[in-house]
Amino acid sequence: MLARILQLFPAEVYLMKTVAEILNERLNQEAVSVLPEQSVLSVAQLMRFKNIGAVAVMHENDLMGVVSERDMLNKVLSLGVDPRDVAAGEIMSRNLAFTSPDETSIDCLIKMKNTHCRHLPVVDKGCFVGMISLRDVLGVDEAELLDSYLWDRSVRSKESRSRWHD
């Protein structure tokens, strides 16, 4: 998939930006975090309000983990567990890959691919300063990426195209 992404979008657009540059381009530069004892329901509500896919779980100034939409789906909702009864600290991902402000977009893509994640905490001098997503790194909307991947006619034969349009 990474190779396909690199084919679809010109590298000079996004690959050499630093994490600091990407974070500075955002409208909302707030580093969003929750406490480990917060309910999954409150975390989900915060993520919906902020329109984000993952949050850092912090205890005092220590980054303990990350809770993503997938964590909530796979560890709570799909099991029929009430999200009011589960704490963020119980479902957070703990063995984190992270990035720093001076790393590049390609560094982030490689880490995301190798760790099978879509979000990386950004840590500067031991302090959590933000979260970077696959969408941030690519500089495109996921829907645009998926559309380009699925409907790139240059890689599909005329016969396969006709199946989709008949």
Image (spheres, rainbow, N blue to C red):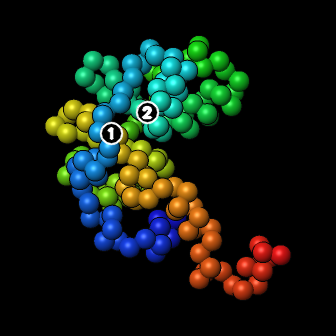
Q: Residue furthest bottom?
A: 158
Asked if 135 appears above or below 33 in the picture, the reply is below
Residue under the point 59% across and 64% down: 147
Q: Provide the residue designation for mark 2.
A: 50
Q: Amino acid at mark 1?
A: Asn
The x, y position of residue 64, in whole percent, is: 35, 27
Q: CA distance from mark 2 to mark 1?
A: 9 Å
Checking the image for residue 65, the label placed there is none
Badge 2 vs badge 1, beta-carbon distance below 8 Å? yes
Comparing 155 with 46, the one in front is: 46
Would you identify the image quadrant in which residue 157 lies?
bottom right
The x, y position of residue 145, in whole percent, is: 52, 62
Position of 113 compared to 30: left or right? Answer: right
Comparing 84 with 145, the one in front is: 145
Checking the image for residue 28, the label placed there is 1
Query: What is the quadrant of the C terminus in the image?
Result: bottom right
Q: Residues within 10 Å of mark 1 (few under 14, many from 20)?
A: few
Position of 129 compared to 108: left or right? Answer: left
Residue under the point 16% across and 37% down: 125
Residue under the point 43% across and 71% down: 9
